[in-house]
Amino acid sequence: MNNMYKNSAVWFVAGSQHLYGEETLKLVENDAREIGVGLNESRFIPAKIDFRGVVTRSDEILRVCREANNDPDCAGLVFWMHTFSPARMWIAGLKDLAKPFVHLHTQFNREIPWNTIDMDFMNLNQSAHGGREFGFMVSRMRMNRHVISGHWQDETVQRELGDWIRTAIGALESKTMKVARFGDNMRSVAVTEGDKVAAQERFGYAVEGYGVGNLTAVIDTVSEAETDAMVEEYRDRYEMMPTAVTGKEPHPAVREEARIEIGLRRFLKEGGFTAFTTTFENLHGLKQLPGLAVQRLMADGYGFGAEGDWKTAALTRTLKVIGEGLPGGTSFMEDYTYDFSAGGSYVLGAHMLEVCPSISADIPRLAVYPLGIGGKSDPARLIFAAAEGPALNTTLIDLGDRFRLVANEVETVKPKHAMKNLPVARALWNPKPDLRTAATAWIYAGGAHHCVYSQAISIKHIEMLADIWDIELLVIDDNTDLGAIRKEIRWNEVYYSRC
């Protein structure tokens, strides 16, 4: 579904000046070009590094920044100061720049040539000097950027740059994202609503509302042959549980879910949507709540939010783009119930139906069970447990005057018990630093009951995303202290009131 990594590029620009002469500038360009080639060959760099030359004057810098702004495939820029590049030259370009950038503070050579070093070498290889000059100007201009220090051939540097590129591509995709909202918000619920105009201004994505009848009209065009083919795909990919078959034929709910999936895909593709919401309170015309259909669409990269939660739908899509190709999955999720056992406390995450099978530890089982909510027929769904290992829960909330990201590092574990009577997909995790602290901090932060659960995304990606979006971020991890995070929340009220 997503070819963002194939089409997107990050521009690599080297800074210098004419003080050192034309021969030195040729060396600067050769070195910068070689770095660009080396980064493109790195297995940690997920998209093309496009070397755009050496800039030495204010007009050149302004031109390249404006060209980047106007290139829809440019996800961001990497600036490197090979020599000293007087920072006043950068003011006009940086003021105009609308794309995110990373300051790569590196140098071409790894080591000092102790036996041959002279002033010619010093003048050419003074990234330590030039990088500090550039850094001062960006700090003075109060601009968000990500700084990576170290040698460009080091794995740690390439990994961090790769993480930033992924995040920049995710933020770029958000600028043109369209979210289809089928029905409205769950009645009387606060946190799943928000200011859609402010969200489009800040993040770029547009939330478009549709009646369920708009969707059912498309579902009604689905043929029996299309439905048969989709059901066969289900048989091939999942373990069919006894509740999913009637005699030798699939349960009618499975066929109905296939029709819903085909119709949903058609609607979203034709409208250019990459995320969507549903709600069990707006199902008029549908025979059952979309469950299996939603799970499979998420597995293919679509963002989703239940009960009209468009913010989580959009965030799910963004994090899926960032994590594309990385091990582990990403899913819409909800903290459902707690285990306060003396031997260890855990959160059981799930939802009524809609958890993405990309996080599954094993082949999902397809089943049909009553839902007990929504007043419709029994829906089909995939049942599985999430894979063990580290994961991250992230939520986006609207505080009225600004948006806030809240992220909690968690460790997903294998349940000690089978939970045979729980007919939904789920994940059991231990939140860091512990359940009592994490839950209290999440609530102080105003975190929603919906989140995006990801095994692919790290806190580093979320920090970079918050910087690119220029929004507040609160992190809950092993170092979280409740007194400190309450102070941070109060201090942030003052800092972000400037925005």
Image: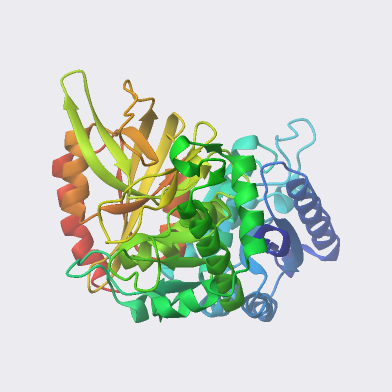
443 is higher (above) or lower (below) than 9: above
**Observer-nearest residue: 127 or 445?**
445
Extreme-front residue of the structure: 247
Which quadrant of the view contains residue 165? Answer: bottom right
Q: Quadrant of the C terminus?
A: bottom left
Q: Position of residue 37 (x, y in %)?
A: 80, 50
Q: Residue furthest top?
A: 343
Residue 39 or 94: which is nearer the viewer?
39
Specify the quadrant of the image occupied by residue 73: bottom right
Left/right of residue 467 with respect to residue 493 in the rendered view:
right
Q: Is residue 400 visible?
A: yes
Which quadrant holds the N terminus? bottom right
Comparing 172 with 215, the one in front is 215
Is residue 53 depicted above or below 154 in this figure?
below
Q: Residue, x 45% and y 67% (percent of image)?
A: 276
x, y percent for residue 286: 40, 68
Q: Name the foreground residue: 370 vs 278.
A: 370
Decide if residue 429 is on the left or right side of residue 174.
left
**Residue occupying the point 33% across, 33% down:** 429
Q: Position of residue 133 (x, y in %)?
A: 54, 60
Task: State how the image is colored.
Answer: rainbow
**Residue depicted at 53% across the width and 56% down the height:** 255
Position of residue 324 measured from the top left corner of the image (x, y, whole percent): 60, 50
The residue shown at (65%, 62%) is: 226
Which quadrant of the figure has residue 68?
A: bottom right
